Image (tube, rainbow, N blue to C red):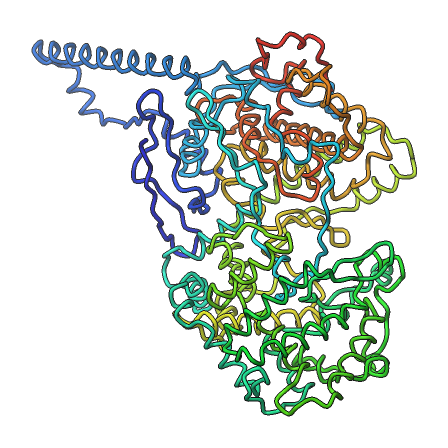
Amino acid sequence: MQKTTIHLLRMSETPIELEPQLSVQPSSPGRGLQPPPLFQLPLPTQDPSDTHQQTQLQLEPQLSESNPEHQQQAVWINPQRLLCLLLGLSLYSAILGLVYYMHYNHQNSNIQAGKGRPPEKHNTITPFSPTLLSLSPTVREGVSPQCLSPACQWASARLSISADPFTQPCDYFLFTCGSDILSPDNGGRQRGQGIPGHPQNRKEKAVWTERRGQSKEREDGGLRKEKIPERNTVLLQYLREILESNNRPGSTAVQKAKAFYHSCLDTKSIETAGAEPFLALIQKLGGWAVSGRWNRTDFNSTLRLLMRDYATFPFFNLYVGKDPNEIARGTTKRYIQIDQPDLLIPIEWNSKKLKPQAKTQTLRPFLAACERYLALLGAPPSSSMIHVGTFISMSSELAVAATPLHFRLSKGQLYQRMTIRELQKQAPAIDWLGCLQAAFHPLPLIEDDHVLLHNSPYIVQMSRVIGKWLNKREPSTSSPVHTYMFLSLLHTLMPALDSRFSETAKSLSTALGDAEEVADRWKHCVLETERGFDLVLTHLLSKRTAHREAEEISQNIFTSFKSKLHELKWTDQKSLQFVMKKVQSLIPRLWTTKEISSEAELDRLFSKVTVGSNSFFSNYVQSLSLWQKRRSQLLTEKAEAAHILSVTPFLLGDELLFPMGMFIPPLFHPTYPRAMNYGVMGFLIAKDILHLILPDVYSHSEMVHAVGECVWAHYLTVTEKAGRGGVFSLSAAQQQELWVQYSALQIALQAYHQSLKNHPNDTSISGLSHTRLFLTSFSQVHCDSDPYSKFMPLEPSFLITVICAKSELCPTSLQCLNKTQQHSLQTC
């Protein structure tokens, strides 16, 4: 299979662009094209409108004016020259005819083998009316110039190896978004989630993995069903490309971020270092009783150091947020919020007795893991059991008052406001003012400042437990409280240690039934780089984002969404009025950061950071400090900081914000034909808006139920499942998700037709008409990873079959010749 090689070109201060060294051409019959690497398509340096002009110009013959002398000489041509000219023209015509014949035969053979797309007739588009259902042909598709940008060449190569929904309309769509969700008796259990943003909660930033059953490739007639990866994975891969790019040196802050990333990839140096970096840090903090060398450091002074420099919170969690009681009044003030920690000991919530409990079958592997950790840190076998025993005993006492979020919410234990002085009286074992001043240095905090508690019974219990263990008459070489703190520190720093520690943690997770796929090292390193250098990555991503084009498609989709609301038949007029008032006041815009104005500012912010090339542990410790300082700034910031890993819209006041991470290749590119951008990103944006603004529309509109059942009836008919035993009805949540995604496709198509009506000079790829390119691009969308994906009972691409069932919208009919019940299909 012929491959295409691409390389980076740096263009002064503009985003870099990749140009192919080899043109993208069809390979031998029976084989597809191998597209270039997926995420090496930075934004072009020219305006997309210029690209359209360039494309048109490249298709025109180059004519030059001749001066009069030349014209006069051309009149007198001797017979010999005339004969040569005629012979040359005849030979030229013969060559053209031969090329055309070979091209025609090659194309026909590809079509017959199902491996290519014929140049199709450009049919009439039938755009949506304001109701999105009443169709009338008003836009005529003409011959469009081909997009020749590097991004379009990549897209063309990708489409050439993907199954065409219009030549394989039946089997192509018969996939589901996950076999595990289609079972009516599917149970499953929910795992508790920690506080967002805390580095000790490793699962909170676990690498996004593709859902089971979705990564399999299906061969059909020599063509694979190429799908675009999930948005989270796409963004991580794009950030990886940024960090691994070999551009000009750039700012020192950018160099430091890249050096941090590469030190994370250097697993050989990490394995060589072993546990020594952590042991050296323990001695720097005064030692601990496990090693027999402990300076008997003060409990609160050690706790302050862990919170300030190592983002470690053994006994409680800290984060910054607003008071929901004040949000309704328009107050934007942020508060320090204190919650129960992510306890290391495995506990389960007993919903009958309403209290946590630890089971023997889970405590045994936890005990073994703790012993293994101490052995890796050089603890003598004779004393390790004593330290592990006291650690588990103290952990159990702390867990007594730990409760899940839903229980605390039902008991009204969230957002309890009190001053630091009042908190000190309730939990005297902790030096609250000193610890909070250390964690939020250099902000000035006083005892009269308010904080918000989320589990005051736990905070009181935690203070009692610490006081009890501090006052115990233990030997001079023992300190259970310090051992507890340093094992918590070990959990924080474990990602920077050698594989023996991570393997121990993996074995424990497996024993507890929580085993997850091990992420690729590069994904892990991208996430760790983002933790400390998020401002750097945000700045780099902003430079590569096509701001104008991203805002344009967002606004157009939002406008089409508002017209969709008028189609809904609401059962409650008050709900309709509330939603319409809310929607009409929203302003869509790109969510960018306003903190960094230049690379010089970045260099100043990271001037005190030193990054070594072969010492990931020290680099990681610095990233934790950077993360802690970054969080401290949230107390004084008025605007909501843009999160670089966000891939869905966000409501903030009267603004509908779209993160920059949404508008990256291959999901979006400014030089793509607009049909591609609207077919993929337009659909995703519409789906996100529907979820965000209409989360419970099912209870307010009968249309949701009707459309959901209609789409499901299409699926059962085409798959010949109707009438079979074992076919179950859809739940309300599944019906709503079918309506959401079907409506999102309608909204995106309406927005594209309106855009095409306003700007009819859209380009094309592979000779496809506008609507066919839109739908073909949409067919590449994978089952997405949003929280609602578990309710989608079929793959989104099947919606093409539904929308083309009985309308003149599609360029060709999607009839399954081997199906006998298609005559019963209705328009949804």
Is residue 668 positioned above or below 474 on the image? above
Give the x, y percent position of residue 531: 56, 64
Q: Is residue 377 left or right of residue 461?
A: left
Residue visible at 58% across and 51% down in the picture: 516
The quadrant of the image that shows the C terminus is top right
Give the x, y percent position of residue 475: 66, 90
Residue that protrudes farthest toward the front in the picture? 382
Give the x, y percent position of residue 128: 69, 23
Q: Nearer the viewer, residue 670 or 1?
A: 1
Residue 214 sits in quarter: top right
Give the x, y percent position of residue 169: 56, 18
Q: Nearer the viewer, residue 731 or 56?
A: 731
Q: Is residue 62 left or right of residue 769?
A: left
Q: Nearer the viewer, residue 426 or 83?
A: 426
Counting labels gives 0
Is residue 632 positioned above or below 479 on the image? above
Residue visible at 52% across and 29% down in the picture: 762
Q: Is residue 743 left or right of residue 704?
A: left
Residue 6 sits in quarter: top left
Residue visible at 61% across and 20% down in the picture: 139
The quadrant of the image that shows the N terminus is top left
Residue that protrudes farthest toward the left in the picture? 80
Q: Nearer the viewer, residue 311 or 680?
A: 311
